[in-house]
Every structure is written in structure tokens, then in C-alpha cells.
Image (spheres, rainbow, N blue to C red):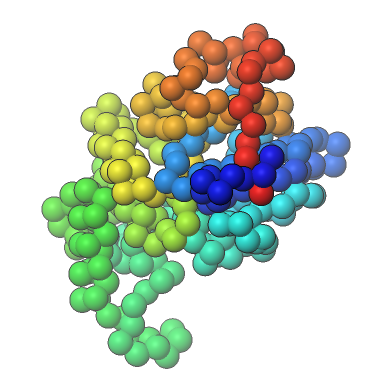
Amino acid sequence: MALSTNTPRPVLEISGLTKHYGGVKALTDAQFSLAPGEHAAIVGDNGAGKSTFVRLITGAEQPNSGSIALDGQPVHFDSPLDAREQGIETVYQTLALAEDLDVPANIFLGRELTWLSLGPLSILNHKAMRARSVEMLSTTGVKIQDLSESLRGMSGGQRQCVAIARAAGFAKKLIILDEPTAALGVQETARVEQIIKGLKARGVPLIIISHNLRQVFDLVDRIWVFRQGRIIANLETRHTHPEQIVGLITGAIDPARLVREPVATP
């Protein structure tokens, strides 16, 4: 279906994305679209294809077939670094943080600012990295009292907030969060969710992978349901309910019986 003149072009558009490992069909013919400023959730049981989907769209693995477009332009990622350079920032469950380094060093890990670039003998611009870190943390509402403290002494929630602030500070196109609160307590979860809501208010597009349906219904505009390696439904959050999503995930509800909303494609 062609986009109308009043329909904004999707930030991210996936067509026919497929990944097989020998005879195992991890993901088949995935069609996905994310509108500007939209927050979407990817849900499904373990082994449904969610992680494979994320690895493919972030360059961690290569698909057998299918295409990816950012802002209407075809892209191909040979590695996560390629995806990052194209404006996709991902916060994995492992966070990819260096526990023995302080906050600015973690935020600029792999993207250090320097006074003089001489390879391994480069002179780092610690002052500029600290000032920019303060700006990133402030923009996302993250509060860290002592930026010089190593992450090893911080709580899981503080580390997660640092990782999200880093992603938000560098993301040019969208942010992907993989189970951002899975290992957090109630208060830390609430803090991370407030940061996500702040990203929504700023119009930052976001994809969240989560098993927490309460969280999903609180945070996103659209829910994409994965089952047995396929995307079987995409529903506006306001037009569905948790029982329906659970039924789709478990197979108790046949997606063919739903009134499916078409995904706009150019």
C-alpha cells in the first residue's frame, strides 16, 4: 500500500527478513515498520525469533534474505559498528559497560574525544567528555551524583540508566532496548521507565523487547507479536489488551481471525 502524502516515511522498514540456521527457521519473512517518534514493543515466547530479529537489524548477524531501510534508504550492516554509524543504538541485556571505568569513560567507550590523535598514544580530552556526559545524563533525566565513580560500585539500575543515556546521546535514527529492566527491582524499573517516557516526549523512536506486558502497555504505541519465527500480528496498544496479546503469544488466538492493520510501505 503506497504512503499517502500526509503519511510520514517510516524511520525503519523491514521487508522479508529471513534467517535460517541449517534446517532451523529462526525468522521467516519478517515485515516490520516503525514510524517517526513511535515506540514499539517486540513480544513473544522464548525462541519466537525476537533476538534473531534484533541481531539482524543491528548487523550482529546477516540474513539469508530480506531488506532493511532507514528513512526510506536501503542499508546493509556488516557489523553492529555499521548499524551504530548509521544511527541505530542498541542497549543489550549485557549493557556492554566497563565496570572499572567511570561514567564519562563508559559513555564515550570506543568514541573517545581527544586533544591529539596518535593511535594508542592519543591524548584524551577528559574535560570535554565529562561536560558532554553531564549534558547527556541531564537530557535523559539520569542522576548520577559522582561521575568519577567506577560503575562497579553502582546499582544495576544506575548502570542501565548510564547505558540508556549513552544510547540516547548518540542515536541519530532510533534506539533498541533489549529487556531493559529484566534484572532490576521495582524502584529501579520505575526509574528506567521514566527515562523511556522522556525519550518518547522528545520524539526519539524506540524499539523495546520485553516479557513484561504491564511495562509494554504502559510504554509503547504498537505491539509486534512474534511466534515460531514469524511476526504474526502488529496491533496498536490502545486497540488491544493483555489477554489478547497473551493469546497470540501462546497460540490460543488465531491471528488470522484478527482485524489486522496493514503496515504502510512505500
Give the tally of numbered discs.
0
Position of residue 127 measured from the top left corner of the image (x, y, whole percent): 20, 76
In terms of depth relative to the viewer, which is nearer, 197 or 164?
Answer: 197
From the viewer's perspective, tell me whether residue 36 is left or right of residue 72: left
In this rendering, the answer to whether 250 lies above or below 119 is above
Query: In this rendering, does residue 221 appear at all?
Result: yes
- Nearest the viewer among 192 and 29 is 29
Position of residue 110 relative to residue 1, above or below, is below
**Which image quadrant for residue 98?**
bottom left
Residue 72 percent location from the top left of the image: 61, 57
Residue name at image x 54 percent, y 18 percent: 245
> Residue most toward the right?
23
Furthest residue toward front: 5
Q: Image point 65% across, 11% down: which residue?
A: 253
Between 54 and 145, the one lying in front of the other is: 54
Q: Is residue 180 left or right of residue 23?
A: left
Q: Nearer the viewer, residue 183 or 139?
A: 139
What residue is shown at x 27% (from left), y 37% (from top)? 194
Q: Residue at x 62, y 40 (%)?
A: 264
Q: Position of residue 178 (x, y in %)?
A: 48, 41
Q: Position of residue 42 (x, y in %)?
A: 54, 33
On screen, residue 133 above or below 126 = above
Name which quarter of the figure residue 113 lies in: bottom left
Camera sees residue 192: no
Where is the N terminus found, in terms of image quarters?
A: top right
Q: Residue furthest left?
A: 145
